Image (cartoon, coloured by chain):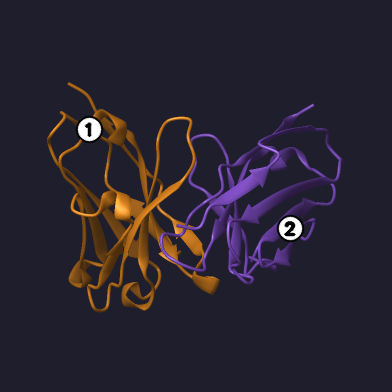
């Protein structure tokens, strides 16, 4: 079936980097944008950026410019989100999502918990 | 960035109730709006896109309407599985901002 499967939970120290993977299956990976969304504990949803798997083109929310990098490996149908210079307020669940019908996010990964703590 | 404001933020209701959630955009977004449902510990689930188009598999008791700056999500007869948090999202421009959420819980 159509799904996105993300890598497991991470615990990082402030100042470190984290890289989360998102593997697509059941559909043509290059046919849909992949978006990244995060959710801090007890909080709402926040878009971080997107990647076009065909071209590798990206766009980032201004809040994350310079700290986030989205990449992909089309040979293994996987997208990646790397966040640098981690702070305690980066503690959140990070989701990848497929941009589908009407550009809405129709398929979501299961989420990856990233905890930033000294 | 386009701001989305949902009302109410919390809603207590009973099974069988008609429930309406409103989402207001800080500027016109035509019909570029989606609605999601999220349950604790789970990823959001797409319910409606293009303001009123039901995603495949979503029950017909849910409906969406609106255009421009004001949108609504209506559940005609609340079912036990509908107790959750609902988010609107604008799809007009990047970043694809979300509303702050509306939690629907048991009265």
User: Image check: B45 left or right of A74?
Assistant: right
Disc 1 chain ID:
A
Residue A102: percent from the left, percent from the top? 54, 73
Residue A46: percent from the left, percent from the top? 42, 47
Vertical comparison of A110 with B60: above or below: above
Residue pointed to by mark 2: B59
Give the colour chain B carries in the figure: purple
Could you say which is closer to the camera, residue B44 or residue B69? B69
User: Image check: B12 left or right of B95?
Assistant: right
Proximity of marks 1 and 2: CB atoms separated by less than 8 Å = no
Q: Residues within 10 Å of mark 2 (few under 14, many from 20)?
A: few
Disc 2 chain ID:
B
Quadrant of the rendered structure where residue B8 is?
top right
- From mark 1 to mark 2, how far is it between C-alphas? 41 Å
Chain letter for the orange part: A
Could you say which is closer to the camera, residue A82 or residue B24? B24
Residue B58 shows in the view: no
Q: Secondary structure at mark 2?
A: loop
Residue A32: percent from the left, percent from the top? 39, 73
Tell me the residue at 70%/59% (across/down). B70
Quadrant the N terminus of chain A occupies: bottom left
Residue pointed to by mark 1: A87
Q: Residues within 10 Å of mark 1 (few under 14, many from 20)?
A: some
Residue A112: percent from the left, percent from the top? 33, 42
Tell me the residue at 23%/57% (across/down). A80
Residue A80 shows in the view: yes
Outermost residue, top direction? A118
Quadrant the C terminus of chain A occupies: top left
């Amino acid at each position: 079936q159509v799904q996105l499967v993300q890598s497991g939970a991470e615990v990082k120290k402030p100042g470190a980097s984290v890289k989360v993977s998102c593997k697509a299956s059941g559909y043509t990976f290059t046919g849909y944008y992949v978006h990244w969304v995060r959710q801090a504990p007890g909080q709402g949803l926040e878009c971080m950026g997107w990647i076009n798997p065909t071209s590798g083109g990206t766009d980032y929310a201004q809040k994350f410019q310079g700290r986030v990098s989205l990449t992909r490996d089309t040979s293994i149908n996987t997208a990646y989100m790397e966040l640098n210079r981690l702070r305690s307020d980066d503690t959140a669940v990070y989701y990848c999502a497929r941009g589908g019908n009407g550009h809405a996010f129709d398929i979501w990964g299961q989420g990856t918990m990233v905890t930033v703590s000294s | 960035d386009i701001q989305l404001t949902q009302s109410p933020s919390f809603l207590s209701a009973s099974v069988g109730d008609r429930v309406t959630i409103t989402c207001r955009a800080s500027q016109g977004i035509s019909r570029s709006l989606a609605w999601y449902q999220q349950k604790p510990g789970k990823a959001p689930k797409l319910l409606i896109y293009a303001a009123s188009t039901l995603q495949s598999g979503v029950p017909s008791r849910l409906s969406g309407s609106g255009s421009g700056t004001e949108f609504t999500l209506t559940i005609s007869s609340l079912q036990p599985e509908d107790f959750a948090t609902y988010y609107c999202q604008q799809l007009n421009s990047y970043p694809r901002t979300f509303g702050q959420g509306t939690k629907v819980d048991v009265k």
